[in-house]
Image: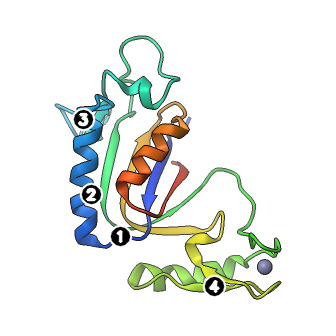
Amino acid sequence: MGDECVTVVEMSIGALEAADRADAVIRWLVDTGVIVPNPVRGSAWQPSAYLPGPQAPAAAPGFGGTDYTLANNGVDILVERELYRDTSPHEAPACPDCGHELAEATLEALIRPWLDGHEPRVGCAGCSAVRPLGEWPDGYLVGELAVRFNNWPQLSQAFLADLGTRMGPRWRAVREQY
Ligand SMILES: [Zn+2]
């Protein structure tokens, strides 16, 4: 069985702000008891910097019992410019206005420019609406700050919204499988 994560990615803030926001987000997650620092970080069983805390069920109500620490179910706060994509089964990126699909080759060609610089704006071949690449559903995202929950039960919408807002104005949650 593979590992499954939900990663919340912020797409609009720069590197310096990402570092500041990361500190604030960590403080909030620790203060509210959702996560605790991992005392033996880096082990194969628990490689993450943080583990589920005593209040983890407040974020993910599906946690059962009283000991929430299972194999590889820590939390990582990622502060580096990185590419993310939802890897759960999904449709090809389609225009939110007309449903026309964005060709995979077009998408692939835009990854490097976004990683190396600014977010590309992409016109729809169907209706010619133009939107930033990150606004195409099921496409790629590039962000400087992300919070990854490894193998957690489903996060509540209220928690996701609270976390996302603390990370920055433009965030998305993506599902990743390894
Ligand atoms: Zn369109």
Q: Earlier in the sequence, mark 1 or mark 4?
A: 1
Identify residue type, mark 1. Answer: Ile
**Residue 74 tag number:** none
Classify mark 1: helix, strand or loop.
loop
Q: Residues within 10 Å of mark 2 (few under 14, many from 20)?
A: some
Identify residue type, mark 2. Answer: Arg
Q: Classify the position of the N terminus by image quarter.
A: top right
* Residue under the image location 46 percent in, 38 percent down: 159
Identify residue type, mark 4. Answer: Val
- Mark 4 lies on residue: 122
Classify mark 3: helix, strand or loop.
helix
- Mark 1 lies on residue: 13
Q: Nearer the viewer, residue 162 or 68?
A: 162
Q: Nearer the viewer, residue 130 or 84?
A: 130
Nearer to us of marks 2 and 4 is: 2
Labels 1 and 2 touching (C-beta < 8 A): yes
Labels 1 and 3 touching (C-beta < 8 A): no
- Mark 3 lies on residue: 30
* Residue under the image location 32 percent in, 56 percent down: 78
Q: Is mark 1 within 8 Å of ligand 1?
A: no
Nearer to us of marks 1 and 4 is: 1
Q: CA distance from mark 4 to mark 3?
A: 39 Å
Q: Is mark 2 within 8 Å of ligand 1?
A: no
Q: CA distance from mark 3 to mark 2?
A: 14 Å
Q: Earlier in the sequence, mark 4 or mark 3?
A: 3
